[in-house]
Image (cartoon, rainbow, N blue to C red):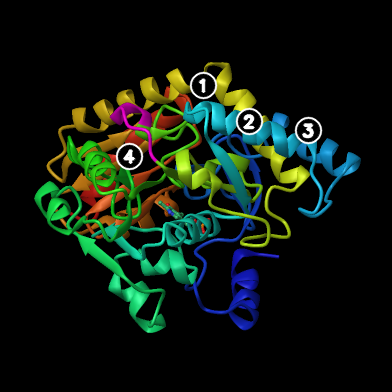
Amino acid sequence: MSNQELQARYGHVMMNAFGAPKRVFVEGRGVHVRDADGREYTDLLAGLAVLGLGHAHPAVTRAVTTQLDTLGHISNLYASEPQIRLAERLAAALGDPSARVFFSNSGSEANETAFKLTRLTGRTKIVAMEGSFHGRTSAALAITHNPKYREPFEPLPGDVVFVPYGDVAALEAVVDDETAAVVLEVLQGENGVVPAPDGHVQAARRLTEAHGALLWIDEVQTGIGRCGALFAHHAEGVTPDLVTVAKGLGNGFPVGACLATGRASDFFQPGMHGTTFGGNPVAAAAGNAVLDVLEDGLLEHVTETGDWLAGEIEGLGHPLVDHVRGRGLLRGVVLTADIAPAVAESALDAGFIINAPRPGVLRLAPPLIITRDELRPFVDALPALLDRHG
Ligand SMILES: *Cc1c(COP(=O)(O)O)cnc(C)c1O
């Protein structure tokens, strides 16, 4: 069946939450995917910062199929070794001996877990950032700034205050002894790959500590190697109380986690929270396979390749490119005009999957295994793609 036939079937049966799909894909290998009409694309978005190891990575396929064939699911009334091992590895990567893990199936659910933990401080006020994105479940939405996402579903879980991202004075003015938590991203991916200004994360750590509040860092997009480290906040030199991850953890197999340190790691008692699927043996096997590959030298490659890519794009000297921001292989190409959606559309027609999180920003989040040779055709094609809309 062709793209067109499948798009029509989609339109008849799927809820219209995502708009009409631009393509229907049938196969993926490494950094490439093929659509229903047989056209090839270079995937520079990696399923929204998910496929760190690329499509159909043999280590993940082997781990998932072997685990499914050995012990696929058991419920969280029981435990499995892969789950325990993945939790141990995530806790060790966080670098705090008190770290404890709760597994989920998505980023939103990881944040839902963290949100519930903040309520167990005995306080309710949460300070979140303007420009934030934390997911679509009710609690995740309550701390997500974009009113377009939030307002149709109000009232949402309450007592959330938003402050401008990076405004330390505003943070100082609202964080007080009633504050349960401050939640932030080290880089706001959905907001157009906006890095926290220098000192912002440290200020949030200092203020939460001074007022007995939790520091909660959402690493759903930035974590698991995307920014060149297992956790992007490591570069900020802080230890958060809560960390959430998901996207890159299972390389496409749905798995997320909420990590807690210190007193927050002991808040949940039996019966307070739960999940049927979260951290099941297959999901855990996928996570372990991803960490195996990441720890085998891939992180240095992410940093080097990301810096090279940013330098190449800025080096084009194109008048429509203002600058490239971000870290590792999470990059925003900041344009001088609001043409990003049109450029992303033209890129797709030219065989490159990218997206436009903001009207003036293109996002690149390719598989972490991508090479310079595989990125080169996009860099070469970019000037003409921009000129078409300039
Ligand atoms: C994608 C994302 C989420 C939501 O994750 P889902 O798996 O879509 O629920 C939460 N926080 C951040 C920073 C994200 O990028």
Residue 59 location (% of width, % of height): 71, 29
Q: CA distance from mark 1 to mark 2?
A: 20 Å
Return the mark for residue 298: 1
Residue at 58% in and 48% down = 256
- Judge by depth and name the residue closer to the eye, 114 or 41: 114
Does the CB distance between marks 1 and 2 fall below 8 Å? no
Disc 3 on helix, strand or loop? helix
Residue at 77% in and 43% down = 281
Q: CA distance from mark 4 to mark 3?
A: 30 Å
Residue 356 location (% of width, % of height): 33, 55
Return the mark for residue 62: 3
Return the mark for residue 379: none
Return the mark for residue 88: 2
Q: Is residue 342 visible?
A: no
Mark 4 or 2 closer to N-term? 2
Give, as a three-letter code, the residue at label 4. Answer: Arg
Q: CA distance from mark 1 to mark 3?
A: 19 Å
* Label 3 CB-ligand 1 distance < 8 A: no
Q: Is residue 148 above or below residue 42?
A: below
Q: CA distance from mark 2 to mark 3?
A: 21 Å
Q: What residue range appears in magenta?
A: 234-240
Q: Rate crowding at label 2 as few (under 14), some (14 to 19) or many (20 or more) other CA atoms within 10 Å.
A: some
Residue 274 quadrant: bottom right
